Amino acid sequence: MKLYHFSEEGSITTFKPRVKDTRKDMPPVVWAIDETHQFSFYFPRLCPRIVYTKSNHITETDDRKFFGTTSADIVVTVEANWLQRILNATLFRYELPTQTFSLFDEIAGYYISPVEVEPVGMEAIKNGVERLLEENIELRITTDLNRLRAELLNSSIQDFGIHQFGSAIQRNSRVPSETKS
């Protein structure tokens, strides 16, 4: 198993445990992502994105709604106003030693370490979109992530991630309620 940490900084020599803004109830830790799920970090850190994966538990209706005609089992959707930043970003993928890490979230592939970690390697990634396509992951561009988020939260899809949603454009999107006759 390989673990990674993605950053827009290319000179990190030590990862120190920190309290994450969205996890203030946790002690300071170093976060890592496993090799299988690393694709969800081929984006600038603050880029709002929604990632979802097809599974056997998805209903036929949700399969048509969320996967439509794609052959991909994984879809990543980002906001259109982030496209140029995504295409121009250079990301740094740090490989981390696995010894001090423990599994935090199996579905997301997150691992945490309570101690400082020194990377064992680093690779610059200049085209995350190209890597997504190589992995048969579909990238979708939308002007509004809010509606997709609402629809996804009310779906049969269980394997999904909503990343950096605080950076998304906030709109007054409403999911139409079903009409009963």
Image (spheres, grey):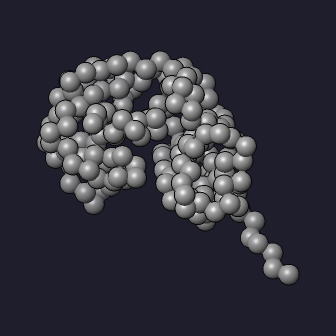
**10 w.r.t. 97: above or below:** above
The image position of residue 157, as x and y in percent, is 56, 58
Q: Quadrant of the C terminus?
A: bottom right
Rendering quarter of residue 58: bottom right
Rendering quarter of residue 36: top left
The image position of residue 112, as x and y in percent, is 24, 46
Rendering quarter of residue 129: top right
Q: Which residue sits furthest right? A: 181
**73 w.r.t. 123: above or below:** below
Residue depicted at x 57% and y 28%: 133
**80 w.r.t. 163: above or below:** above
Residue depicted at x 43% and y 20%: 125
The image position of residue 26, as x and y in percent, is 25, 57
Question: Horizontally, is 45 left or right of 23 in the view?
Answer: right
The image position of residue 172, as x and y in percent, is 69, 57
Residue 132 appearing in the image: no
